[in-house]
Image: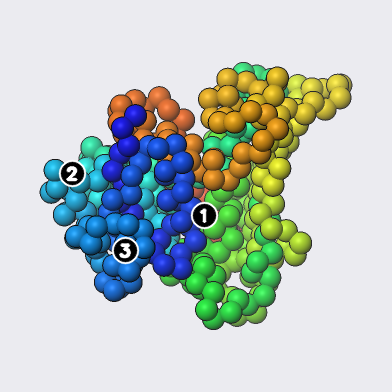
């Protein structure tokens, strides 16, 4: 396909996730980055644009100016990538959707439920699409697992468990740690571990199982003295149909880097997957030995093959999974085909509702909250 024109808000000098989004957007040749508001500081915004090869007349210091200017251009952007702190996601997305420009937004969708509901309303009246980059859904073995569950290979689902463990916030971070600074500010993040990585685990559990969470009980804890957001979250879930689930998200679990795992247990079998070894999926049928399914291998199904780029035995991982989401977004924007496997506005709202319910439950000593 002809590459679409992409803009970016945030992700300037010193940012981590902006670079990831830029690499992912161009991996499959689906997007060309042509404009950006990389910082609210005009000098830093322009310096970032120059580094990235963006024309100076398409470097903006205000996202509202960028949305209006790009919408007015005959060669304006087709989509904008939002890679700012969480509290800015909603206002930025609404500004571009108001001009019918599609939005590719980093997760979580917003910092508050009120922002999420406002964005949901804005998306309904826009000709632009909204995509949320829960990148772990792009792994081939996650697509394999989702298809196996849908095909009934596990039978009736009984238990879903998703854990995401890190240790990088086990101590109070240095003052110059930009990533930690906004993530531990409740006004910017909307939550700690529950919003930063808990939403990933929760989204993955729902994406693969196909189940809808109906209620939850949560305990959120701040282990580091003086911290204003949670750094450890433990949540029990009830799903429609009677299945039960559990999510543990922690950023103080010493010895863990990005230990995201998923396990699903049904009446006929189970699946187990680890993000740190993503090219392997373990499938066990009741009464039989575990089977190791590999990405690109003989047991890989059509859902996995559709997002597999290279032969078996060559690792595919984080960036490729991210790129899959960008490719699917580009295909939908270009063709208006809504049948692709994408994470959209409803998934984003569900994720923010999950965070909100967890916070309310924890404040009520773990009371069950209906979603």
Asked if 209 appears above or below 257 in the picture, the reply is above
Q: Which residue is mark 1?
A: 355
Pointer 2 or 3: first along the chain: 3
- Mark 1: secondary structure: helix
- Is 254 located above or below residue 155 in the figure? below
Classify mark 1: residues with Cα within 10 Å, few (<14), some (14-19) or many (20+).
many
Q: Are marks 1 and 2 in contact (CB under 8 Å)?
A: no
Which quadrant, please, contains the N terminus?
Answer: top left
**Of the pair 244 and 138, the residue shown nearer to us:** 138
What's the CA distance linking mark 2 and mark 3? 20 Å
Q: Residue at x 18, y 44 (%)?
A: 75
Instruction: Kindly identify which numbered label has been placed on residue 50.
Output: 3
Which quadrant would residue 162 be assigned to in this image? Answer: top right
Earlier residue among tags 1 and 3? 3
- Give the CA separation, mark 1 to mark 2: 39 Å
Q: Does residue 80 appear left or right of residue 304 in this picture?
A: left
The residue indicated by pointer 2 is 75
| Image marks 1 and 3: residues in contact by CB distance under 8 Å | no
Q: Circle 3: is it few (<14), some (14-19), or many (20+) Cα within 10 Å?
A: few
At x 71% / y 42%, what residue is drawn? 277
> Is residue 108 shown to the viewer in this render?
no
In this picture, residue 246 sits left or right of residue 30:
right
Rendered location of residue 305, percent (x, y) = 58, 24
Q: Earlier in the sequence, mark 1 or mark 2?
A: 2
Judge by depth and name the residue closer to the eye, 47 or 104: 47
User: Percent position (x, y) of residue 148?
Assistant: 64, 23
| Helix, strand or loop under label 2 | loop
The label number, if any, that marks residue 287 in the structure image: none
Describe the element under mark 3 as helix, strand or loop.
helix
* Distance Cα–Cα, label 1 vs label 3: 38 Å
Q: Quadrant of residue 258?
A: bottom right
């Amino acid at each position: 396909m002809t590459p679409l024109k992409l803009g970016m808000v945030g992700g300037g000098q010193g940012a981590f996730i902006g670079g990831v989004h830029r690499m992912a957007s161009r991996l499959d040749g689906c997007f060309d980055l042509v404009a950006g508001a990389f910082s609210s500081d005009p000098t830093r915004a322009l310096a970032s644009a120059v580094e990235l090869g963006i024309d100076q007349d398409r470097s903006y210091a205000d996202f509202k100016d960028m949305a209006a200017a790009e919408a007015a251009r005959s060669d304006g952007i087709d989509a904008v990538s939002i890679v700012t702190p969480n509290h800015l996601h909603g206002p930025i997305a609404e500004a571009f959707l108001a001009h019918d420009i599609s939005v590719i937004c980093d997760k979580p969708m917003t910092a508050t439920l009120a922002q999420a509901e406002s964005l949901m309303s804005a998306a309904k009246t826009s000709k632009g699409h909204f995509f949320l980059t829960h990148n772990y859904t792009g792994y081939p073995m996650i697509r394999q697992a989702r298809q196996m569950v849908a095909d009934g290979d596990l039978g009736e689902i009984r238990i879903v468990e998703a854990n995401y463990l890190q240790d990088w916030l086990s101590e109070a971070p240095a003052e110059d740690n930009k990533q930690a600074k906004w993530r531990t500010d409740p006004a910017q993040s909307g939550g700690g571990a529950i919003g930063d990585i808990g939403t990933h685990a929760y989204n993955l559990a729902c994406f693969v199982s196909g189940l809808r969470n109906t209620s939850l009980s949560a305990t959120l804890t701040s282990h580091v003295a003086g911290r204003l957001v949670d750094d450890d979250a433990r949540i029990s879930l009830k799903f429609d149909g009677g299945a039960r689930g559990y999510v543990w998200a922690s950023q103080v679990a010493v010895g863990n880097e990005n230990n995201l795992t998923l396990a699903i247990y049904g009446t006929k079998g189970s699946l187990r997957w680890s993000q740190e070894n993503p090219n392997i999926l373990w499938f066990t049928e009741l009464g039989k030995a575990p089977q190791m399914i590999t990405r690109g291998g003989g047991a890989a199904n059509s859902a996995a093959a559709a997002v597999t780029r290279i032969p078996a035995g060559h690792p595919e991982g984080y960036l490729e999974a991210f790129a899959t989401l960008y490719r699917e977004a580009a295909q939908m924007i270009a063709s208006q085909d809504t049948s692709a496997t994408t994470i959209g506005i409803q998934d984003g709202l569900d994720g923010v509702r999950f965070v909100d319910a967890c916070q309310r439950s924890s404040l009520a000593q773990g009371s069950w909250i209906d979603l």
